[in-house]
Amino acid sequence: MQERSLKTKAVKGVAWSFLDNIASSGITFLIGLILARLLTPEEYGIMAMITIFIAISNSIVDSGFSSALIRKTDIKPIDYNTVFYFNLVVSFVLYCILYVLSPSISIFFKEPILIGITRVIGCILIINALAIIPRTIFVRQVDFKTQTKVSIISSVLSGVVGVGMALSGMGVWSLVGQQLARQLLNTFFLWIYCKWKPLWEFSISSFKEMFGFGSKLLLSGLLDTIYNNIYYLVIGRFYSSAQLGQYTRSEQFNSVFSSNLTSVVQRVSYPVLSSIQDEPKRIREAYRKIIRNTMLVTFACMLGLAAVAKPLIIVLIGEKWSVAASYLSIICFSGMLYPLHAINLNILQVKGRSDLFLKLEILKKIIAIIPIILGVFWGIETMLWSSFLISCIAYLMNSYYSSTLIGYSTQNQIKDLLPSFFISFFVAICMWGMTFLKISAFILLPLQCLLGIFLAIFIYEKMKLDEYIEIKKLLFSVLKRK
């Protein structure tokens, strides 16, 4: 009964979390397609220049406390209040720092408009801080249905704001308006749906307990955030805003699949695996099933996206973004490993080994300096290919430590994943081969997609992999209910 309850909880969580990510990101992606036709690569590049500063600040605001709260089994109201006020105070402090540093940021990138943009977009820090506790409560309850509603509403309304501003000729400010509106609406509706309300209380002992766990995640999260956004800094400083804009668009296409799949896996697997953290056999089997099912979908999506990158971008946002297609094809190879990294690192958090988590992040980020140096001297594409190689090394490091905690070795992981990888790689090669046909991108793209879908289904039906059968049953059960 307990096993069935856990499985039901996980399946519902995955379904709603996936819908949340697909719906909100899908809407944002569609809005982005409209904006990409209305705006220039230069304007997207200018907006991307401030990304790393906002991302780092958001990591500091959270400080690993949300993960600490999710993992904590004997949660008390004072724990929520303590974290809430800490997050809020830190967000105000960081906004003030960004406000003061905005002229320096502008000088660094040689873009005067960044002074005003930094000071306006910095308000997101305070808005996000207000949303951390309501969102954490929903995650603890594995309630992604409510979050899905909130995401859809905020994505649609903020999209209307962004497109309206772009049509009015407001340029890069339309991107600022869209982001601010989305975060503001998201926070507002989370508070509407969440029954929790803050009380005037703060516990030093609660703070110390959670900070002991969260501080290590904060440092590792900062390293990860800096690394994930450092390319914006490097390209923005050593190349043009137009090239940064092209890279930004390729990353956004990539994130529709890789980041959303990673987010779904992290959000659902962490609370579910945490609930069975003291049962070695159950956690190992659950973990094995998660990576096999997740990576079958991930390999298919990411390798397929790499194969159709050029016609896809031309059809959706036009020839002016064609440079982004070459970047996207490379980025997809790194992107297909993101969920695998996330699942392995989740085990370290579930087992309370935030010390190992931090150690790993430090080691990986030291190695990751290599692609950055190559990018400065030998170009953006060289940087992206070397980043993929570093990502492979990072996986081996992540899986080594997680395997020692649950008894599921890297060798066994790779053995479980190779069948779905080779199938997806073969299908992607066949799809990519069609690009040599001298036909319009508008005809080529649907032909590639149809070939990929039917060829993949044919091979999986013949091979009857367990993960494929399970995903197939899940899809049929969902369709049957509908």
Image (spheres, rainbow, N blue to C red):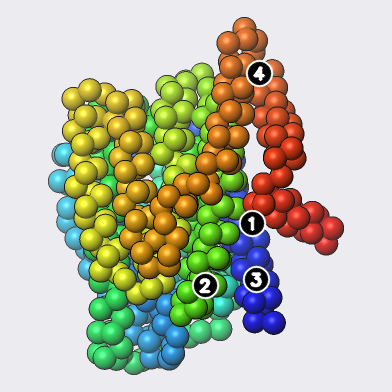
| Residue that appears at 46% across and 80% down | 278
Q: Name the secondary structure under disc 3.
A: helix
Quadrant location, the C terminus: bottom right
Circle 3 sits on which residue? 7
Mark 4 surroundings within 10 Å by alpha-carbon count, few (fewer than 14), some (14 through 19), many (20 or more): many
Which mark is drawn over residue 444?
Answer: 4
Residue 46 appears in the figure: no
Q: Secondary structure at mark 1?
A: helix
Calculate the distance from the C-alpha at mark 2 to the C-alpha at mark 4: 48 Å
88 on left or right of 375: right
**Residue assigned mark 1:** 19
Give the mark, 2 or 4, whose residue is nearer the N terminus. Answer: 2
| 2 vs 1, front mark | 2
Q: Nearer the viewer, mark 2 or mark 4?
A: 2
Q: Is residue 289 visible?
A: yes
Q: State the residue at coordinates (34%, 92%).
A: 201
Q: Which mark is residue 281?
A: 2
Which mark is first along the chain, 2 or 3?
A: 3
